[in-house]
Amino acid sequence: MSPEEFRKNAHELVDWMADYLANPEKFPVKSQLQPGDLLNALPAHPPEKSEPDSQIFADFKDQIMPGISHWQHPMFMAYFPANSSYPSVLAEMLTATLGAQCMLWETSPAATELEQVVMTWLAEMTGLPDGFHGVIQDSASSSTLIALMCAREKATGFRFNEEGSNQVHPLVVYGSTQTHSSIEKAVKLAGIGRAGYRQIAVKPDFTLDPEALEAAIREDIRNRKIPCAVVATIGTTGTTAIDPVREIGEICRRHGVWLHVDAAYAGSALVLPEFRWMGDGLELADSLVFNPHKWMFTNFDCSAFFIKDTNHLVNVMSVLPEYLRTQSHGKVNNYSDWSIQLGRRFRALKLWWVIRSFGVDGIREKLRFHINLARLAERTIRNWSDSEILAPSHLNLICFRFRPAERHETDWNSFNEEILKRVNASGKLYLSHTRLNGIFTLRMVIGQTNVTEDNVNSALDTLMQVKNQINSEPPNRK
Amino acid sequence: MSPEEFRKNAHELVDWMADYLANPEKFPVKSQLQPGDLLNALPAHPPEKSEPDSQIFADFKDQIMPGISHWQHPMFMAYFPANSSYPSVLAEMLTATLGAQCMLWETSPAATELEQVVMTWLAEMTGLPDGFHGVIQDSASSSTLIALMCAREKATGFRFNEEGSNQVHPLVVYGSTQTHSSIEKAVKLAGIGRAGYRQIAVKPDFTLDPEALEAAIREDIRNRKIPCAVVATIGTTGTTAIDPVREIGEICRRHGVWLHVDAAYAGSALVLPEFRWMGDGLELADSLVFNPHKWMFTNFDCSAFFIKDTNHLVNVMSVLPEYLRTQSHGKVNNYSDWSIQLGRRFRALKLWWVIRSFGVDGIREKLRFHINLARLAERTIRNWSDSEILAPSHLNLICFRFRPAERHETDWNSFNEEILKRVNASGKLYLSHTRLNGIFTLRMVIGQTNVTEDNVNSALDTLMQVKNQINSEPPNRK
């Protein structure tokens, strides 16, 4: 491809991109592909000869696009969003063009220093207490794994890092029954072992019960185990429950335990003064993660990891071979020493572009709009005669189910499961689910960048139609 | 930003991108910024109000660009490249636009199935033996960490994952003195501990000495330690030495030890029949990594990780909470179960685009061209009266130094260090270094996508000029 062919092709792509982003609703929100459809359609062997870009782009549109679930579609109300925005896409175009590998300050000083600046901005925007230093990781999973590795080394005097973890007392990590699965995964991967993972009971509002935590820590100490870390969540995945960070933090301080706060989704809402209460007690935390790639309009991957003791972090994560020694060593941050990976994309650029393009006010406005739409949807669902809200909704996730009078209570789980299946198969709306106290629970998240009130009303209509349709069928058809 | 503003802005960016990629030589290859320059120039606080895109783009050009080291610049001959190409950039534009989070098959079936297809293509292109299954990771660091976690669990019956690693016998991992630092880092992070990392001696050609490996394993077994994994390297970072995979693999088989092959850089050259010998014995390996984002024209991040026992991989890496259960579970690959991260970008698209746009023949042609240029440069350096080649160069990395007759031998290290410093400060050429048997060694890699013979000659001229300049100065000026 010549420079001029690239220019022509890239302009052609931009028109497609602009059309797509202006109207993703042309596509079913959830891909309707069946397993193997694409696998069987694509050539089993790579092409020996170069193929023209026009053919590749045509195949992208014809073959790949039907297999995409559209995360930027306003009817995407599943999981937590991975939302993006125009300024973020622009910045990603430049990041890809520069193709800079930002492992060290010297391999692109602007990437390191811009990261330092935007992470300071984020800390100010979200009202983090003094003393936190930020770095961009790829995901909350990695951020949490890093936090637990730091906790592990602190609790054992670098035994896992150095002599090896055998012959240390067993470590224990605490979350709640609602804590995200990435914490359990991190406990596995960090070699602490799932036997050392306690999922503390929650209160009826699904927040971690501090008294149960205190009791569990005391019992583990009695049993000569080492309480190593507690993970408190601001905005659990199941229901966006807000754990009481201050009470948990005081327990951690009392027992010398690392406190990591997982605010992966809801952390963005800390930019709203009226939601700062969620962060009460954060000065007691040792580390925190939230993902601008979830609800701050910045393309995945962009996970904001904050930690107080950066010396400890670097001691846990780094090795320094000769070929990575640079003249500036010791004078600058080399963020590969703060991460699992040596290689790093220039991820700060998109966050900088987004914050400047929206302005902090613009971000606040969007988040408030989403939260208000969620209140509207929640009110409607609550007013339906045969529905039930299953968890408090502070933000923009609504957990609910139908309780159709026409069906026996023991059929309600399968009834709601059938609703989810048909809604998602319709291509009109994409929801996800969880299970709360054994109840199959529908999750509706209103956080897609460009979601409107019309979209929310349309989602509620779709739900009602699907429900009525199932209700009109004999139960054995389910 | 309205859809039409985005369209206009993105077209404007494309023209800048095309100009930049057609002529990155307008910029100094290594950023000339000093620590803190950008940090001090940028606002300490985030903007409250939205700023126009034209201003952000202008600041990108004025403030950020001077801080970029240009990895796509043809005079970038430092480290290993993170090279890119036109088709890769096009695909990245679409990936950013879709903004799909490809954690599960259902959250974008095309991403999963395309990944499966292109990884099969890669296995065929590089002549991997049967039985390997591929997945895209972010980096070789992560791939290696995952491989060592798999080895760790295999050696201990899932003790690290489940009961915790205390009270197991100490594990040992083997590399060579030339093995990449990411292996030492992985040993630290995996909780095996650096005391359990043996850096086996190398032969004069910097390849791992199998006899020394065998002896080390036997001694560890005698000392009731558990040999857990060996990392063999195809193309070490220091000198691109090619460890003897077959001999190492036979030792691993004999002792039941996991063999991981780190071919991060040189793996791309396995597409060349004349370099297939490097992979001799790969059927004895359990896992392998190579990075198309290094020398296969595909934007970082795109690390190809291959493993034989995918069931074991999934057992080691995964947890399955309710909210990630989907209807297709068990029928498809959910690649987040193959990775540390839950979230995943749609990384297969760029690899697909690159392979089709170049064709396998086109990739071979580029690699051969680079290798031939390296032979040319090596010949020239060898012919200089005061230079010395310090390691065999099979591929496109040349390790050398100057031995100026005008200086005492004890000054040669500082002399070459000064050359590196001045070359990199010139903005004309970017080299890196390593230390071989105590000798400060210049590393010159000729693998940038669009590097030409003129670029290589110009690099050699720059080296010669800088050397002559230093030689003309009194020694105490150094």
Image (spheres, coloured by chain):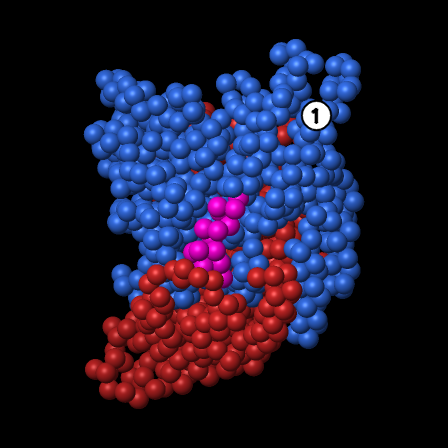
Chain colours: A red, B blue
Depth order, front residue of B147/B190 = B147
Depth order, front residue of B288/B173 = B288
Q: For the point 32% across and 47% down, which residue is it?
A: B128
How crowded pointer 1 is (Cα within 10 Å; few <14, some 14-19, many 20+) is rated as many
In the rendered image, residue A23 lying in the magenta stretch gets the answer no
Q: For the point 74% across and 59% down, which residue is it?
A: B57
Mark 1 falls within which chain? B
User: Residue A234, relative to residue B109: is it above or below?
Assistant: above
User: Residue A279, relative to residue B395: is it above or below?
Assistant: below
Question: Which quarter shows the C terminus of chain B?
Answer: top right
Going by the numbered disc 1, the residue's amino acid type is Lys
Which residues fall within the magenta stretch? Answer: B357-370
- Residue A214 seen in this snapshot: no
User: Picture coordinates of residue A476 (x, y %)?
Assistant: 21, 82
Left or right, residue B106 beside residue A117: left
- Residue B136 seen in this snapshot: yes
Left or right, residue B130 beside residue B93: left
Q: Quadrant of residue A109?
A: top right
User: Picture coordinates of residue A196 (x, y %)?
Assistant: 34, 38
In the rendered image, residue B362 lying in the magenta stretch gets the answer yes
User: Picture coordinates of residue A156 (x, y %)?
Assistant: 42, 27
User: Picture coordinates of residue B420 (x, y %)?
Assistant: 66, 28
Q: For the point 63% across and 52% down, which residue is it?
A: A98
Please, which residue is most extreme toward the bottom here? A472
Question: Which quarter shows the N terminus of chain B?
Answer: bottom right
Overall secondary structure of the magenta section = helix
Depth order, front residue of A408/A172 = A172
User: Residue B462, relative to residue A45: is it above or below?
Assistant: above
Q: Quadrant of residue A470?
A: bottom left
In the structure shown, which secondary structural element does the residue marked by tag 1 occupy?
Answer: helix
Q: Which residue is mark 1?
A: B467
Q: For the point 36% across and 86% down, which residue is it?
A: A468
